[in-house]
Amino acid sequence: MSSATPVPTPRVRRLPLTGVLRLGRPSDIWFKPALSVVAAVAPPNLTLLALGRLDLAMYTMAGSLCALYAHNKPYAARARALLWVVLGMIAGLAVALVTASLTTNAVVLVTVGAALAAVQKGLCDATRIGPPGNVVLTFISSASLFAPQTPGQVPAHLALATAAGAWAWLVGMAPALVRPYGPERRATAQALNAVATYAAAHGTEKSPARARADDHPRARAAAAAAVHAAWQSLLATGTRTAPRRALERLLVRAEVALAAPGGADPERLRAWARELRGSGRAPVPQTDVPAGAVEDELLGVDAELAAPVRPLWTRLGPLTPLVLRTALGCALAGYASLALGVGRPYWALVTAASLYQANITLTWGRGVQRVVGNLAGVLVFAAVAPLAHAHPAALVLCCLALNFGAEALIARNYWLGSVCVTPMALLITEFARTQHSGELITERIVDTLVGALVGLVAAAVVTNRRATDRIEEALTGVERARERAGRLLAEPTPARGTLDSAHRALAAALVELRATADAASGEWWQRALPQERVVLAEQSGHRTLAATVRRRESHSWPTGDRRTGRTTEGVRG
C-alpha cells in the first residue's frame, strides 16, 4: 500500500443564486459621485444643446464620466488618480476613433474593442482605481469604435473629450476647498466603526475574560482590513500635516482595540467616528503622554512613506487570467452579436467586460445582476423615451437624472444601478439622431443575453489555476512579516519606529492573505485550498499584532482604562 498522500482532484464550486440580488446599505458618500457626475456632464451637454450640436455629446461624455472615479482617495492622491483616468480615457478614445476612421470592418472593430477592454481591465485592477473600474472606459471606447468617423474629425473630437475631462478633474477636486481632509476622516471613521463592531461582538461572549481574538474571525478580518485601508489613505499623500497626525493617533487607538477587544469600549470608538463625520476638529484620545512620546509611536509612518513603491508590472502578473478572460469573452460576445445580425455589437462586448470579477463565483453573481438590471432598465427606457423625444432639452435632462440615479443606487446593488445605467446608455445613442425605441430595446436585450452567456462561458474556459499558488505566496509573505515583527519583539529596545512599521507590514500581509484566500475559494477547478494553514497563519499573525501593540503601549503609552480613556500613570519605558 502506497504511503503517498493522495492529491485532491479539482472540483467545481456551486454557483449561488440566493443573495445575489439582495440590496445592501447605501454608501456613506453615495451623493458625492452622483452630484459630481451631474456637475461634470451638465455644462458640456447644455453648451452643446445651446449650439445645436448634441451629436457631439458622446465625446464630451467621455471626459465628463471621469468624474465618477477616485472619490475615496485623499485629494492629493485623487488629483493624480483623476489625471491618469482622464489620460487613460483619452488614450482609449483615440485608439477607437483612429481605428473607426480607418476601417468599417465589424470583425476588426470588435477585435480592437476586446483588446482595449482587456488592457483597461488589467490596468484598473492593477492600480486599484476603484469603482466604476474598467466598465466606463470600455463603454466609451467600444461605442466610439462604431461611430462614423473620418481621420480629419479625430483631433476635434479628442479636444472635446479633453476639455470635458479637464472640467471633470476640477469637479472632482472642488470639495477639497470645503473639506480638505474629508476622505482621510471618512476612512478613519470606517476603521473605528469596524473595530467597534468587532469589539462589540467579542463582548457578547459568555465569558469575556476567557474570550479569544480568534472567536470572530470575519469581524476581525473586516476590522483589520478597514484599519489597513485607513492607513493606506493617510500614507497615500506623502505628507504628514497636523490633521493627519491626529487621525494617525486615532488609528493607533483602533489598533489597540483590535488587539485587545475585551478591554475596548465600542461606544467610545463609535463616538470618535461620529465626530469625524462632522466638520469639527478630529477628537483627541485622552492621555497624559508628552507629544514626543506619541510621535515615537508614529515614526514607522515616515519609514513607510520613504519606502519604494511596488512597480506596476509586478501587480499585473497575477491578473493575467482575468485579462485573458476579458479579451476572450469580449471578442466572442461581439462576434456572436455580429452573427445574430445585431447592429450594435459593442453592447454585447461591454456586457461581457462588466462581468469579470476576482473569481468565477463573483463573476456569475455579477452576470445575474447585469441581466436583471438591464432587462428592468429597458422597461424604464420604454417609459422615458416618449418624454426624451419631446425635445432635445428633455433628452439632456433625462440623461442627467439617470446619471444621478445610477450613482445613487449602484452602491446598494449593481443590478439596481443598472436599472438607470441601461436607459441612460440607450438615450446617449440618440444624441446624434432619434431612433426607433422598439429596435433599440430588442437589440439591447439580445446583446445583454449574448454578452452575459458568452462572457460566463469564457470565464469557465479560462481557469485561474494559479489562485492556489497565490495563497502560498501570501502565506509566505505573512510568515516573513511575522518573523520580522517577532525579531523586533525579542529585542530589548527596537530602533524607534521599526516596530510600528513591522506592525503595519504584518497587518497588510494578513489583509492580502484574506483577500487572496477569498478570491481563490470562488474559483472553479481548483486544487484543494490550504484552509487550515490560512486559519493558523491568521491566528498566529493576529497574536503577533496584538503583541506588538502591547509592547508599544508599555513603552509609549501610559497604563489606563481603555474604556474611559483616562490615564492612571504617565510611565514611558
Image (cartoon, rainbow, N blue to C red):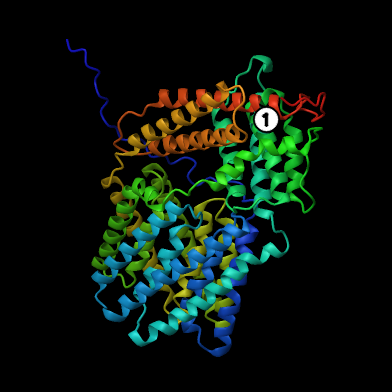
Q: Quadrant of the C terminus?
A: top right
Give percent across and percent down for residue 203.
68, 23
Q: Which residue is mark 1?
A: 257
Q: Quadrant of the N terminus?
A: top left
Give percent across and percent down for residue 487.
52, 24
Q: Is residue 542 left or right of residue 467?
A: right
Residue depicted at 36% across the width and 48% down the height: 319
Q: Is residue 360 left or right of residue 409?
A: left
Give percent across and percent down for residue 264.
71, 27
Q: Which is nearer the eye, 300 or 457?
A: 300
Indicate the secondary structure of the residue bearing disc 1: helix
Q: Is residue 283 above or below residue 172?
A: above
Q: Is residue 396 above or below residue 214?
A: below
Q: Is residue 220 above or below residue 349?
A: above
Location of residue 564 by image quarter:
top right
**In the rendered structure, which amino acid carries the disc numbered 1?**
Ala
Q: Is residue 573 above or below residue 500?
A: above
Q: Is residue 441 left or right of residue 284?
A: left
Q: Which is nearer the eye, 179 or 397?
A: 179
Give the residue at the far left of this rendering. Answer: 1
Give the residue at the far top of this rendering. Answer: 1
Q: Which is nearer the eye, 569 or 176?
A: 569
Q: Residues within 10 Å of mark 1 (few under 14, many from 20)?
A: many
Residue depicted at 60% across the width and 27% down the height: 548
Whether residue 391 appears in this view of the structure is: no
Give percent across and percent down for residue 401.
60, 69
